[in-house]
Image: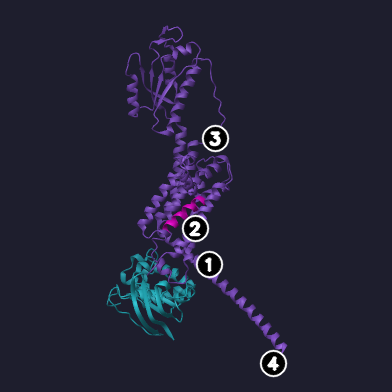
Chain colours: A cyan, B purple
Amino acid sequence: MDMVNVKKLNVIFGKKHIVHDVSFTVKKGEIIGLFGISGAGKTTIIRVLTCQIDKKNWNGEVLVTGLSPSKKSNHPKILSNIGYVPQLEELNLYYELSPMVNVEVFTSTYGMDVKKAKEVAIKLFKILDIPEDTWNKRVKYMSGGEKKRLSMALGLIHEPDVLFLDEPTTFFSYFN
Amino acid sequence: MHISSRSWRCEIINNNKNQKSGKVLNRIKSFTRSNRSIFRILKQVKKEFQLLWTDKFNIFIALIVPPLVIAMLGITGYIASSTTTPINCVLVSYDSNTYIMENNFTTSRLDNYTSKYLSAVNKSECLNLIEFFNASENPYSMETARNYLIEKKIKIIISLPVDFSELLTYGYPGIIDCVVDSSDMKEIQNNLNAVYDSIKIFVNDNNLTPQFKLKGFEEFAIPPDYSFRYNYNVVITLSFMVVGVGMVLTILIIVQEYPIARLLLTPVKRSEILLSKYVTYTCILTIQNISLIIAALSFGLYMVGSVFDLFLALFILGFSGLTIGIFISTFSKTKTQANQLFFAAFLVLILLSGIFIPIDAMPIYLQAIAYILPLSHGDPLIRGIITKGKSVFGFDFFMLLGVIIILVIISFIIFNKRKYEV
């Protein structure tokens, strides 16, 4: 089954034609990367796939986990099936709360049980090498790399079918 | 193809069963959907409290400052009511100057009542005589006194006219002129009351006839064992404070919360996020109102109406502040814009509240604006409950309720249309 299916995607904002006839498919288990110069429209494509851009601004055939983001009624289902790690951490994390509370905030939106969410979070934190002494301290005290990994953990916590990563290597050190 | 009537009936029954089970399934789905929604809202409320807890300064502003202000008013009101501050004055007498009688053109230089009135001024605890000028000896007495008034050395010039002693001697009511510093409108009546106190002493000491006795019929007055200053100040402060603090608490809650953009990439709905904010700050408002009422009553607030009515009045006023704050926050694109909008909105609220300029004295278009602003209803609502024992449910309450409903609806619409991109 195709997890993501994009055919002739065009994104237009007013007079600006940002994405021209983009087509690609992503199968289950596949990892693909979008490369392009600044302003090429990489983030815009992800925004279409993550239901952030109104249908009036784009056209083409787009299916994410078999559902089209063109229908507003599909949005909750698509958002439940996908994970997203944005480019900027300040848009993704509550800096004044601890990583564990952040986990609770984001997983509650999927209706996940707190205990189960915390168990999954601990596993992910260990895999992503987030130091244990930071788990219950405020996110603002974490380093850039730790914030990025926490962001990834939050994107993965509800075990999504598809994970979108925008500029995932920012702040990553060679060892991470 | 032949289909028997029995098989038709079976199909219809099965269809009905399917329809019924479909309805039940739909009901279960909608029930679980609403349950999930409640679960998400509760979790969002928890998050709001956690965020609020990290900002101790906001909690201080919301829950500690308001009762502290009331306590300060209580203490200063008590001190002010237990001590009388005499008002500085000078007495200028023209009484020793030559007076020409109007009927027979004879001259008179009677001034026997000047020293008597001077002693009455000295006796009065409300007045503090700085200097006495005899205009027959010093022709620049009034000019000097006016200079004192300009320099704020005194607040009143009491002037005895040339015929002061003559009129009293021949049994006519005497006249005393008063020049009061009117640069502070609130103090005019206080200053005149002090002069009136000296006249009372003068009339009593000299058995002057005819003696006038003023009998006041006061309605809704504060009893003597309560501080009228405290009551007056509390009424004004309460409405300003609950609306102001409500606005201050909420003007940044949306514009400042950047991760909302990321939250919206989960199944949570925009309305759930906004509703959770309303719920959280309503809880804070309730605690604030209870602490305010306890503080106000414990410092000796005189109240005719019911405490519950006062609570409801404060609650609806505070909630109007919250809705304005949230409205500004949903409307603004940046924190700076929100702060500037708050300042502008609060200025308009205060200026058109009717405290500085009576609403009925405003031009009709300003009156229309004033009546839809919450602060214009705060003062009459609270004053009505505290001093007149009125019920909270009246024009002001329902007007506030209407404004709140409109603002809440608008804030939900704006928040639903607000652009978020991660």
Please report the residue visible at 34 percent of the width from the left and 78 percent of the height from the top.
Answer: A20
Residue B78, given in percent of the width and then of the height, sits at 47, 37
- Find out whether the residues at labels 3 and 4 contact each other: C-beta distance under 8 Å: no
**Chain hosting mark 2:** B
Q: Are marks 4 and 2 on the same chain?
A: yes
Main SS, magenta residues: helix
- Report whether residue B47 is seen: no
Measured Cα–Cα span from mark 2 to mark 1: 19 Å
Name the residue tied to disc 3: B221
Above or below B180: residue B111? above
- Residue range in magenta is B315-329
Chain ID at mark 1: B
Q: Residues within 10 Å of mark 2 (few under 14, many from 20)?
A: many
Q: Residue under mark 3: which chain is it in? A: B
Q: What residue type is labelled 1?
A: Ile
Q: Do labels 1 and 4 share a chain?
A: yes
**Which residue is more in the foreground, B340 or A70?**
A70
The span from disc 3 to disc 2 (Cα, nearest Å) is: 38 Å
Nearer the observer: mark 4 or 2; the answer is: 4
B421 horizontally vs B308: left or right: left
Identify the residue at image location x=42%, y=23%: B178
- Which residue has dot 4 on it? B2
**In 3D space, how far apart are the residues under numbered discs 1 and 4 (Cα atoms)?**
54 Å
Question: If you read the primary sequence from the N terminus, does the residue marked by circle 4 or circle 2 appear first?
Answer: 4
**B148 drawn magenta:** no
Secondary structure of the residue carrying numbered label 1: helix
